Amino acid sequence: MKIKEVIIKNFRGVKETQIIPLSNFSSIVGKNDSGKSIALHAIASFLDPSDYPIVESDFNDNSQPIIIECTIYKDGLKEIIEKKLKSKFKKDDGLDEFLADIIFENSIKIQKQYKQIGKNCSVVNILIKNFDDVDFINLYKKSDEELKTILDKLSITVPTSGVGRNSKLEKIKFIKKYCIENAIAIKNSWVEDEYKISDILPEVELFASDYGLEADTKFKTNSVAEIQDFFNEETKESTSRLSAIEKDIKDKMNKEAESIKNYMLDYTSSLQKIEITPSVVWKDAVKSVDVSFQFEDDEKPIQMSHKGAGYRRLFMVARFRYLAEKNKGKNIVYLIEEPETFLHPSAQNDLLFSFNELSNDNQIIITTHSPVFAGSTNYKSIILCKKENQSIYETAAEDEKEKNVFIQKIVKELGIKPHYNLVDNFSSILFVESNNDVDFYNIICNKILKNTIKENNKILCLPFGGENIDSFVNIDYFEKSGRQLFLILDSDKHNTEEKQKKQQERKDDFNKKENGSAYLLKKSCIENYYHPRAIERNYNLNENSLVVFEDKENVKETIKKICEEKNIQIKTKNNFEIYNCMTENEWTELVEEDLLNFLRNILDVKVA
């Protein structure tokens, strides 16, 4: 469950209504004090006012309410809301009609109004389809008696079944039927969320720019909650083993510490130990959680609060990598201020990787000054914050010319540079969609063409990330170099017609460049080139139990089904265990001759 759009009014530096579209991973950029963090804090207060209550300084105008609206979307949203309401209503009592009125393309729109400080909002509304007629407007706000009056006036009889009177929704169902049959116009309006639909909102975690565990109440709260759940479970049968339970708690937390340590070793090899030590007071269950580090020259673990800000940030990098694995499939919105602070660029790249992994199942919204983070964000997911009498938020337009103007604003704002400085002996540049694609095409060159592109000092292989800001900067920069430019794209044949068309357009646009040449894979994506015999060998499956994947097949979904049927684990995406054990004949069987010819052209380019 994720936020598709947030609308803010009268919150901090926002006076008049600001509309901010969001994606799985969004970056808000802008100068200091422009209002980048306003959006994060508004979302936090909207999703969890208990932990992020409204305070006096949040009101831009104390005489007016703060209004925050969020569009929440998720596949299967109807089933989630239906499950919440089915104990109150039967489908034939008008529940289906009610759901159809509040769900807009797998989304619901919820509005919260705050008229005073505190943990509770004054009004919670939900957007609903309504009738634009004085007699039928706001049916869901009307009382039973008012609805009965309408039914009597229209001579509508609502059939009864079982014991008791008809429900409110059932009355509305039959009035709506009359309105539709009589072509009464429909418009959208806000009604009170009397059925508490807003209870299904996702969880949220806000990480302030001065992130450090000693100030991170949310981290402590979550960690303590984990321990309490464990404690409650262990003490269901008996309370006589408290000392053993305490040991188990400490072991549990230090397993987490060990996992985070393994990630953190990537950035500081001298780290010896991380301790996460709960202070247990049985009458209070757990009072607090402390984190300590022990490095090579340390005699004992030292609390993180006594270490530098850089180490606290490295802990954040490691913890987000841990959360990316732990919280797969959960609905959490992570709001992070300036994650690049105190981090070396290499650690920024690692944190960016963690964010991308985490955003597959959750949502990440960051504020940043970092070219690394902003450059790796899809231009549609960049929000430029400016201060012009109030904080305003600008996003990319659909118009191609306006889109390019917006991208140049981002480039100028952050000083995003090309990833490489050109070296004279590069004769060609190959753009691919990711580092994994570089390895994939290199294996094909090695196995079939007996050559290499990855270690070839005449060829620069450059992952460009599709529609990320970096892509526009790199391609524009290298286009001016006079080198031969090549591009290989997935065809996305398993995907929607819209996405297939987009890939074809990208190919056609690239081919229009003076030195550009693009190729669209015959198969949907690189996973369609897994050979079934290699899968069988690598995962001990019966020979010839699998068939060659079709060009349009959704291979990831097919492999998931194979895993369920065979009770095995196979990595679905970028599985180089499969690629590396494929024979030359197996590669030749699957790789189209057109792709081989395209790679030959890249390898044969001579220095001008």
Image (cartoon, rainbow, N blue to C red):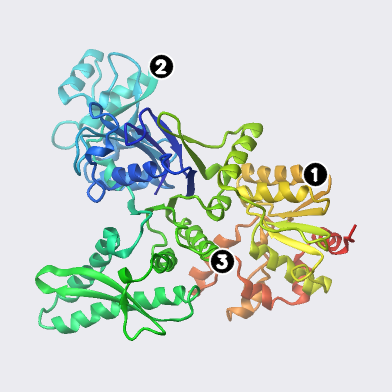
Q: Secondary structure at mark 1?
A: loop
Q: Where is mark 1, residue-wise?
A: 513
Q: Amino acid at mark 1?
A: Lys
Query: Looking at the image, which residue is at 41% across and 69% down?
Result: 311
Q: Mark 3: few, some, or many residues within 10 Å (few <14, many ≥20)? A: some
User: Helix or strand or loop: what does disc 3 sit on?
Assistant: loop
Residue bearing mark 3: 572
Q: Position of residue 128 (x, y in %)?
A: 34, 30
Residue at (69, 68) in percent of width and height: 439
For the point 83% across and 48% down, which residue is it?
Answer: 515
CA separation, marks 3 and 1?
Answer: 35 Å
In front: mark 3 or mark 2?
Answer: 3
Compare marks 3 and 2 and give the one earlier in the sequence.
Answer: 2
For the residues bearing labels 3 and 2, Cβ distance under 8 angstroms:
no
The amino acid on which the numbered mark 3 sits, given as a three-letter code, is Thr
Q: Nearer the viewer, residue 196 or 63?
A: 63
Which secondary structure, mark 2?
loop
